[in-house]
Each structure stands twice: as structure tokens, then as C-alpha cells.
Image: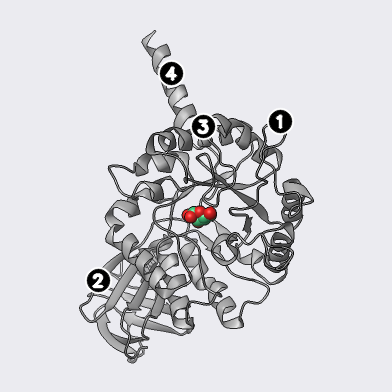
Amino acid sequence: MHLAVLLFTSAVSVGTFALDNGLMRTPPMGWLAWERFRCDIDCEHDPKNCISENLFIDMADRLSEDGWRELGYVYVNIDDCWASMDRDEKGRLQPDPKRFPGGIPKLARYMHDRGLKLGIYGDMGTHTCGGYPGTPLDKIKIDAQTFADWEVDMLKFDGCYSNATEQEQGYPLMSNALNATGRPIGYSCSWPAYQGGLPPKVNYTQLGKICNLWRNYGDIEDSWDSVLNIIDWFFENQDTLIPAAGPGRWNDPDMLIIGDFGLSMDQSRAQMAIWAIMAAPLFMSNDLRTISSGARSILQNKMAISINQDPLGIQGRRIIKEKSGIDVYWRPLSKDDSALVFFSRRNDMPYRYQTSLKKLNYTTGSYKIFDVFTEKTMTLKDSTDFVVSVNPTGVVMWYVSAPAKLSLRQLYKGGKLQGFAYDDDENNIPPVFL
Ligand code: GLA
């Protein structure tokens, strides 16, 4: 009897709380309309940029033809302002027929035919933030089923026009409803952003069980101030946020604005570097049809992407905040590798920052360094002082390989234990670094 009750309760609680979709074991990557294209619905005067199926088709073409998809950028995500003001005769959401004449299934097919995925936007509340029909509690099941019927792959579920109590019910309910459709649909919850992003109002243990990613904080805008403000909030609260993240569950500091109007090249590298350290979802919001080659090469930087996508999925932290305006960020990676970012808040000139790996808590050994943006490599002993030159509002980013492991072959040369030896020659170290 007791066992039966126990089994029943645990089945119910799993059913109620686990988002069992196996998706997003590394942070999702792709493109999201909002920051760059907002709620432009004026297709008559602005046909290239209005929220319409053409925009998403254009972006899908660019992702699949310009080398993005192969790097992992596979989601094409619709944001707000896609819907018609009225539900259909069966109570289902429907897209604006003028701007989406083929309907959402056509777009989904377009993505799937190209190895891409389609994301859509909804809102836990009476209306979306842009004033379109929302998904109040009594519409959650039908909307989840509609998205699944359309073969959508991801849902961003915003939180305008609902209160804390409704959100507390609605976000887990939507998680359940998506699961119940049987279609794996990545689930992005804006819930914490509406509750201040911090405990006790926000329960990150619960979020990790019901959502694949969540917006913790306010909206990004096309400016360095906005990026800096987001970075500061996330790292001031890193001790709360880091444990929340892991494979299948990510903190979302919002879109990449690289390739838009507000960031210099140095600031663009800084956003890419810090988003990689944070294990953040990489959703670009830019115009892939006209993006500059400089912005493209930052977004397509393979080493930065591989740091972001590290399979361990441990979110990195700020380890030093110097009075000089230099911050150092660190992220542990698989195989005992790690990433370092030297970041400058200064506004004067490149700053020569001197430190050593030992001062950055690295253990004894000789490390291989790969500079992510200059592609220079070098070897560095933990105890050796080095200098990095960090541009104003810019970064230097390093991929750091763990010291070579002890080699059993060397250790047991001739069948006898020979003592400690590294695979790499410790003396083979160039004296100058940068
Ligand atoms: C909120 C979200 C944004 C965007 C808009 C759409 O502000 O945080 O990311 O989705 O709504 O109206």
C-alpha cells in the first residue's frame, strides 16, 4: 500500500515537473527576430524587413548557404507580432494571413528540408508584450497542441499580462502540455525575468526541471551600455546562476547583437567571448543578408563556439575584478581544458595587464594557449608572468589546454617506474607572450 502510494506520487511528480525532451544538451544556437526586426508589420512599405514568412525564409537561406548551419546555428525563431488578432473558429492561434500566407507548417517544412529548426513565440498571459493574443491558463493545452501540429521545434514563452500566481501555474503547465504532445519542443521560459531573476521569488531548481532555457533579466538593446549592464547583472549574481545551468537547462542573457548598429568590433568580440564563458544560448538577432564580414567572422569563430558548446555545460565565472578596470573570466571545459577572458572596462587605450596562470589559480604545469581571435598559439608555464594587451571595451580570449598528462609509456620505460614525466617537453617554452 505504502509502496503503491509512493510509486503513484513519484509518477505524478515526474509527470508534473520533468521536461523530458532530451533537447539542448549544449546551449541552443540560431537566429531570433526580435532585437533587430521588432514588431515591424508594415509589409507594404518595408517588405524586406517586416515580420512575414519572407523574412524567415531569407534567414533560413542565409543560415544554410553561408556556413552558419554547419557551425550549429540551426534555429530560426519567430518572435512577437506573428499572430492574427483573432483565434480561429476552433479556438486556435493563427498567423496573420497576409504576412504568413503559407501558414506556419509551410515555414516548418522549409526549415526541416534544410536541416534547420523553427521556433515560435507565445505569452503566458492574456496578451503578448506587443498586444497580440496570449495564452492564458485555459488555452495552454490547445496552444501546445497547435505548435506541435505545426511541427514547431521550440517555444519562447513570454510573461507579459499575467501575475506571479498565474505564472507559477502556467509555466509548469505548458512544460507538461508540450511533453504531452509527444513532439520534442525546446522550451524557453521568460518567467524568471518577470520575477526579478533571483531567489526566493525564482526557483532555479524547478526551472531546470521544466524549461530548457530561461530569460533571467531585461531585454537587450542595440548598444554597448545594454550589453555591459547584462554582463554585470549576470556576474554579480553568478553564485546563484552558475549552479542553475547545465546540459538541457541554460541561463539566457538574451540575443547576440553582433552585426547590428550598436557595437564596435572590439565590443562584438567581447559579447561573443562573454556569451561563450556564460554557456549562453547563441541566438543572433541581426540581418544575415547584409552582415559585414567582420561581424560574421566573430560569430563564426570556431573556437569561441566550441567553448560555448563545451559538453560539460558548466557556466563560467568572473574570477577577478581589478581596480584598473580589467576583469578576468574563466570557464572550466571538458578534458581539464579551460577558457579565459581578459576584459577591459576602460575607455582610454589598450591596457597592458600583467599576471600569471598561477595568479589565476592554475596548478603547476605548462599549458598550451590558443588565442581565440588572433589564432596565435603559445606555451606558458603557470609561474611565468605574461602581459596581455586588452583594447578599451574589448577582450583577449584564450583557450587553455590542460598540461599533458603523465605518460604511462614514459613512466614505465623498460618495465621500471621512471618517476614523473610530462608528454610535453617543459623546457620547450618560448619566452615572450602576447
Ligand atoms: C518581451 C521579451 C522580448 C520580446 C518582446 C516581444 O519584451 O522580453 O524578448 O520577445 O517581449 O514583444
The amino acid beneath tag 1 is: Lys
- Front of the two marks 3 and 4: 3
Q: Earlier in the sequence, mark 3 or mark 2?
A: 3
Q: CA distance from mark 4 to mark 2?
A: 48 Å
Q: Say what secondary structure mark 1 lies in.
A: loop
Residue 91: image x %, image y %? 67, 32
Where is mark 2, residue-wise?
320
- Front of the two marks 1 and 4: 1
The amino acid beneath tag 4 is: Leu
Q: Quadrant of the N terminus?
A: top left
The amino acid beneath tag 2 is: Ile
Q: Which mark is residue 90?
A: 1
Q: Nearer the viewer, residue 161 or 317?
A: 161
Q: Earlier in the sequence, mark 3 or mark 4?
A: 4
How many residues crowd around disc 3 within 10 Å: few (fewer than 14), some, or many (20 or more)?
Answer: some
Q: Earlier in the sequence, mark 1 or mark 3?
A: 1
How many residues crowd around disc 1 within 10 Å: few (fewer than 14), some, or many (20 or more)?
Answer: few
Q: Which mark is residue 8?
A: none
The amino acid beneath tag 3 is: Leu
Where is mark 3, residue-wise?
137
